[in-house]
Image (cartoon, rainbow, N blue to C red):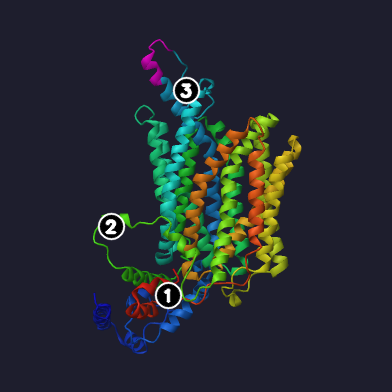
């Protein structure tokens, strides 16, 4: 294929389309085109500009300068109710977190009741003389506390987790990249629609158990993963917050979202317990969760402003079109499947473009590794902690509930009060919105990350050494202080890439989180099963070592490093004429 001829033809098409559009416009449009195109900061809809500029246009430098500026510059001229802000999301996010936390226990109990019901129904077919009491859905049924039923429940939840986790690992990075090109709001609606669909399927399965087998609930896990699950939801919330907050305040804003999540996990189960007790029906909680998802979607569509302007979405689509053109078409769908690479989104953690450097690659890889360790421990360790507390200290559900409340309350206190307070003392009141370039992580953020990891390490060391329940609970409170590290880590990561690649970066982190969600619980439970008879603290020793490794790695992160200036679509097209294989490198992907 003649690359020069192909681009010439494309440029001719673009020019013809532009002339056709220009003929329909009046004097103001003609003046703007004569000056080189509609300015990116104009209030004119960006759809009126050509998709790809002709090679002779000279406003590419303006595009480059515009794409490097933080997104919140685009909205300064708007009134507050039209200006995107992370605080728009916090209220609905708290409701969503409460719904997420509120259905955790009822859903497990509902699954147990449905599986128990199916188990005894199948058993009665082989033993007609078998008589068993009616099973109340979602309630404690003594006859369901048998090894056979427990095994089936564990297998079912493992299957659901694998379905949701594997799909989320594939879909979450795609949704993150799509959000850079089409905005954050549509993708957040998609992620919430997955959870919305899951609640509907759960309600149907619980309402008509004679018609719908319990395996229908696996379809809910499927839709949840297909829409990215809560991993993509958190990534999109962080992307929206990144677009609308200064870099030096992102750790605080991310901390608010993490605090809202843990508030929902801490308070949601208690509220659900009172609601189910008052109504006498476990299904009521799922209707409430469904209403929360509907409210979130409607609030997104009708109230919350989009954080990415049309101009930024348009520019990101231009760059993506150049990349696809550089790759060339594939002959058929079989080759497309064969060429699919699950790990391709992780390329953003190892940029090789002309504006990258070994320092930026090292920082991104190290920070991503530390974040994956912290997330993996959070996902996989809590089950072991609960089982261990019952085994060693004979804690009942009451003591375990108190333990969870103490841990989550300390975590929320750190995220909503201590972290914002410390950040304000160091950085001053508010963020300097006008003087905040992308400068990579700074010494303050690295200090917060290292202190947080150190408290996590001390907490798990305390789990290992504690032989009394009071010291074990105190160790959990100490470990919860480490919760400040996670939002600061993700804020630091977003400061290493240009604004137009934030969604892609957080989508890649969603892929790593999905892997951690699948692998960590399996590995930690296997270690505990293998060592519980000899040295049950083995899992905590390994976790302490992992945090020690993460703390050591954090000292190799260099402050003040960031990915260089972005390459514009026109520059990439010019490179493609000379070297088609260099386009992705020049785009920095």
Q: Residue 327 placed where, x, y %?
A: 32, 68
Q: How many angstroms separate mark 2 from mark 1 (CA)?
A: 26 Å
Q: Residue 445 placed where, x, y %?
A: 65, 64
Considering every residue shown, the one lying at the far top of the view is 129
What range of the chain is rendered magenta?
Answer: 121-130
User: Which element carries disc 2, helix, strand or loop?
Assistant: helix
User: Which element carries disc 1, helix, strand or loop?
Assistant: helix
| Residue beneath the point at 60% across and 58% down | 487
User: Which element carries disc 3, helix, strand or loop?
Assistant: loop
* Magenta-colored stretch includes residue 125: yes
Quarter of the image where one finds residue 431: bottom right
366 left or right, relative to 470: left
The residue closer to the viewer here, 504 or 141, is 504
Instruction: Rate crowding at label 1 as few (under 14), some (14 to 19) or many (20 or more) other CA atoms within 10 Å.
Output: many
Give the answer, above or below, for where 101 lies relative to 113.
Answer: below
The residue closer to the viewer here, 196 or 124, is 124
Residue that numbered label 2 is attached to: 335
Q: What is the number of callouts on the image?
A: 3
Which label's residue is closer to the chain start, 2 or 3?
3
Which label's residue is closer to the chain start, 3 or 1?
3
| Residue beneath the point at 70% across and 52% down | 455
Q: How many angstroms separate mark 3 from mark 1 (CA)?
A: 63 Å
Look at the magenta stretch and give its main secondary structure. Answer: helix
Mark number, residue 135: 3
Q: Residue 295 placed where, x, y %?
A: 47, 51
430 left or right, relative to 133: right
Mark number, residue 586: 1
* Magenta-colored stretch includes residue 263: no
The reply to whether callout 2 and callout 3 are in contact (CB within 8 Å) is no
Give the answer, above or below, for where 20 lies relative to 278.
Answer: below
Quarter of the image where one finds residue 561: bottom right
């Amino acid at each position: 294929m003649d690359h020069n001829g192909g681009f010439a033809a494309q440029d001719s098409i673009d020019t013809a389309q532009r002339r056709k559009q220009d003929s329909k416009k009046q004097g103001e449009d003609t003046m703007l085109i004569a000056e080189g195109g509609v300015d990116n900061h104009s209030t004119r809809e960006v759809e009126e500009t050509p998709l790809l500029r002709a090679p002779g246009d000279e406003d590419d430098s303006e595009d480059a300068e515009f794409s490097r500026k933080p997104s919140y510059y685009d909205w300064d001229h708007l009134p507050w109710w039209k200006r995107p802000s992370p605080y728009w999301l916090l209220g609905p996010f708290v409701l969503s977190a409460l719904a997420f936390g509120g259905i955790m226990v009822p859903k497990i109990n509902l699954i147990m009741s449905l599986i128990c019901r199916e188990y005894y129904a199948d058993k009665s077919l082989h033993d007609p003389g078998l008589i068993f009491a009616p099973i109340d859905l979602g309630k404690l049924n003594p006859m369901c506390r048998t090894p056979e039923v427990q095994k089936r429940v564990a297998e079912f939840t493992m299957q659901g987790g694998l379905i949701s986790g594997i799909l989320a690992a594939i879909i979450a990075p795609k949704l993150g990249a799509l959000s850079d090109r089409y905005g954050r709001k549509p993708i957040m609606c998609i992620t919430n629609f997955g959870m919305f669909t899951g609640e509907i399927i759960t309600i149907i399965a619980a309402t008509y158990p004679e018609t719908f087998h319990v395996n229908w609930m696996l379809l809910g896990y499927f839709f949840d993963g297909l829409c990215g699950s809560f991993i993509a939801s958190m990534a999109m919330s962080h992307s929206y917050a990144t677009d609308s907050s200064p870099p030096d305040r992102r750790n605080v804003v991310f901390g608010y979202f993490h605090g809202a999540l843990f508030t929902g996990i801490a308070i949601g189960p208690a509220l659900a317990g009172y609601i189910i007790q008052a109504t006498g029906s476990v299904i009521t909680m799922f209707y409430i969760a469904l209403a929360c998802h509907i409210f979130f979607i409607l609030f997104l569509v009708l109230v919350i402003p989009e954080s990415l302007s049309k101009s930024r979405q348009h520019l990101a689509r231009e760059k993506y079109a150049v990349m696809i053109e550089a790759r060339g078409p594939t002959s058929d769908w079989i080759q497309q499947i064969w060429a699919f690479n699950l790990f391709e989104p992780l390329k953003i953690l190892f940029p090789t473009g002309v504006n990258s450097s070994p320092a930026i690659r090292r920082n991104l890889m190290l920070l991503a590794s530390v974040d994956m360790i912290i997330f993996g421990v959070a996902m996989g360790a809590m089950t072991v902690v609960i089982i261990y507390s019952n085994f060693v200290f004979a804690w009942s559900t009451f003591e375990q509930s108190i333990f969870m409340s103490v841990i989550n309350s300390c975590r929320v206190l750190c995220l909503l009060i201590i972290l914002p307070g410390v950040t304000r003392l160091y950085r001053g009141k508010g963020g300097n919105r006008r003087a905040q370039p992308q400068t990579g992580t700074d010494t303050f953020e690295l200090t917060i990350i290292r202190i947080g990891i150190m408290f996590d390490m001390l907490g798990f060391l305390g789990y290992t050494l504690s032989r009394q329940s009071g010291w074990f609970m105190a160790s959990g409170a100490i470990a919860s202080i480490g919760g400040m590290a996670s939002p600061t880590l993700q804020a630091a990561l977003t400061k290493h890439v240009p604004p137009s690649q934030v969604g892609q970066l957080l989508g890649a982190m969603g892929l790593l989180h999905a892997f951690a969600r699948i692998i960590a619980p399996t590995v930690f439970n296997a270690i505990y099963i293998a060592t519980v008879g000899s040295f049950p603290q083995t899992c905590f020793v390994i976790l302490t070592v992992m945090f020690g490794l993460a703390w050591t790695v954090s000292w190799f992160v260099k402050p003040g490093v960031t990915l260089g200036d972005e390459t514009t679509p026109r520059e990439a097209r010019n490179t493609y004429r000379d070297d088609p294989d260099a386009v992705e490198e020049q785009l920095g992907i």
